[in-house]
Image (spheres, helix red, strand yellow):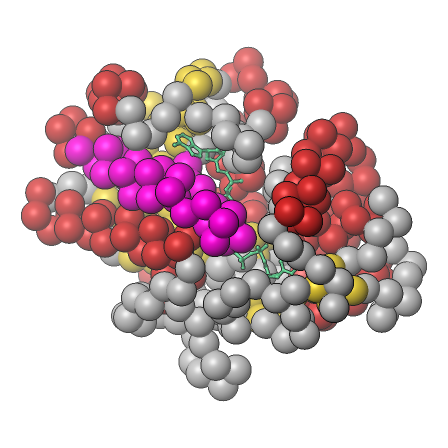
């Protein structure tokens, strides 16, 4: 199989490439990545001699057309992915997430190539504490520029399946954690703060709930969909990992031997979604997928060890990222 992976130098894409190279030696992997601030060649260093890397933009039609014509399957991870950035500068989200997906869809349509679209549970908006989890039938109701552009890209995929017969599947996954995640994101930000002796920073009261899944479990689900998924179907991916943000910070503080209240409340995110939760029963029942990481505290402890052991990977981004949060007006409450 000739597999084109977009965004393979980012967090989830890089872990997907590692997993694929290890588990599927028969697959020939090409990565297309623009190497934005979020992309890092070092994340692919352990597999560099077993893949082809192409530095380029998913919204470049000539390049995308050439690469897709030489592929059997495309898995599209590339995106602008951070909500806070989308509030400050929405334009790159429109360009990469919407125009980039459109560009790929036109290419897979022209060459009749199988396409898998990586998306997020945030397209469904947020839930009250007592509402049932999202399913594939939940109406779209995105809140942020990021989630609105991801929702737009999902709708393009659905239309290309229905109108043009493109052979596509979509997955909407909950919050991922694990190695190689950029230090702008919640868990790596707090781990690297703690390594630096800085107090974790909780937006507002910290009562918001996310449904955490280990990145390797997400990627195993993507492979289950590629192997056995139904064309045109949307699969929700989640591992029953609901925790509020304050509880996550408390677990991390325990991991570092610090007091449970040794954190700061900082300025809340505008429009901050309250709760996400995934009903993954279709994935479990139809495709037989099960998460390997069933204990969030264990997975988190392994992630802490990875950041302790790989400081050279994250250190160059840390001060730039914290300076950006300060410039955006984040303040201790
Ligand atoms: P990330 O920001 O870590 O990585 C994104 C990658 O895409 C980077 O390597 C970047 O250089 C590349 N990229 C950005 N714009 C590009 C362009 N125009 N052309 C080519 N490459 C480009 O993101 P992530 O957290 O790994 O997320 C990957 C995908 O998974 C995204 O589609 C995201 O919406 C989705 N997702 C993420 C999560 C999560 O918790 N992180 C959860 C559900 C879904
Ligand atoms: O310093 C922080 N303090 C804090 O309390 C940061 C960076 C975040 N938070 C909160 C905001 C959220 O409630 O933690 C939660 C998680 O924040 P993020 O890591 O920014 O993730 P989120 O906004 O939930 O979106 C993530 O999951 C869905 C990914 O970034 C998206 O790409 C994915 O689609």
Is-magenta flag for residue 78? yes
* Above-or-below relation of 161 to 115: below
Q: Is residue 157 left or right of residue 187?
A: left
Residue extending farthest bottom = 130
Instruction: For residue 218, say whether it is visible.
Output: no
Q: How many marks?
A: 0
**Picture quarter with the C terminus:** bottom right
Q: Is residue 168 left or right of residue 29?
A: left
Q: Is residue 8 left or right of residue 65?
A: right
**Which residue corresponds to the image point at 75% horizontal and 33% vertical from the top-left?**
315
* Above-or-below relation of 117 to 267: above
Task: Give whichever of 297, 271 is nearer the camera.
Answer: 271
Q: Residue 298: x percent and y percent? A: 73, 57
Which contiguous range is marked in magenta? 77-106
Task: Give whichever of 97, 26 is nearer the camera.
Answer: 97
Task: Give whichever of 70, 41 is nearer the camera.
Answer: 41
Q: Residue 69: x percent and y percent? A: 22, 20
Q: Residue 269: x percent and y percent? A: 57, 63
Is-magenta flag for residue 236? no
Magenta span dominant secondary structure: helix
**Which residue corresponds to the image point at 63% horizontal and 75% vertical from the top-left?**
207
Residue 266 figure quarter: bottom right
Residue extending farthest left = 163
């Amino acid at each position: 199989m000739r597999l084109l992976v977009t965004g393979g130098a980012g967090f989830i894409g890089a872990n997907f490439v590692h997993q694929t190279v290890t588990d599927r030696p028969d697959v020939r992997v090409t990565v297309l990545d623009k190497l934005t601030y979020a992309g890092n060649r070092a994340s692919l260093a352990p597999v560099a001699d077993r893949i082809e890397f192409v530095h380029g933009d998913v919204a470049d039609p000539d390049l995308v057309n050439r690469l897709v014509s030489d592929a059997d399957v495309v898995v599209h991870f590339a995106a602008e992915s951070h909500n806070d950035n989308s509030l400050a500068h929405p334009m790159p989200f429109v360009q990469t997430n919407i125009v980039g997906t459109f560009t790929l869809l036109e290419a897979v349509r022209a060459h009749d190539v199988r396409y898998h679209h990586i998306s997020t549970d945030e397209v469904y908006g947020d839930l009250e504490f007592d509402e049932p989890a999202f399913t594939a039938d939940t109406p779209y109701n995105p809140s942020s520029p990021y989630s609105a552009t991801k929702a737009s890209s999902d709708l393009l995929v659905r239309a290309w399946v229905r109108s043009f017969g493109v052979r596509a599947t979509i997955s909407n996954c909950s919050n991922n954690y694990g190695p190689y995640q950029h230090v702008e994101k919640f868990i790596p930000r707090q781990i690297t703060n703690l390594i630096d002796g800085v107090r974790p920073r909780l937006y507002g009261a910290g009562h918001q709930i996310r449904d955490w899944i280990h990145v390797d479990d997400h990627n195993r689900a993507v492979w289950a969909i590629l192997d056995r998924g139904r064309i045109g179907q949307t699969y929700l991916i989640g591992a029953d990992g609901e925790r509020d943000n304050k509880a996550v910070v408390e677990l991390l503080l325990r991991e570092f031997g610090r007091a449970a209240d040794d954190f700061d409340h900082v300025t809340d995110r505008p429009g901050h979604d309250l709760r996400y939760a995934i009903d993954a029963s279709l994935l479990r029942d139809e495709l037989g997928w099960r998460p390997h990481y069933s204990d969030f505290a264990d997975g988190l402890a392994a992630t802490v060890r990875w950041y302790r052991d790989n400081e050279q990977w994250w250190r160059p981004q840390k001060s730039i990222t914290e300076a950006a949060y300060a410039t955006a007006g984040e303040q201790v409450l």
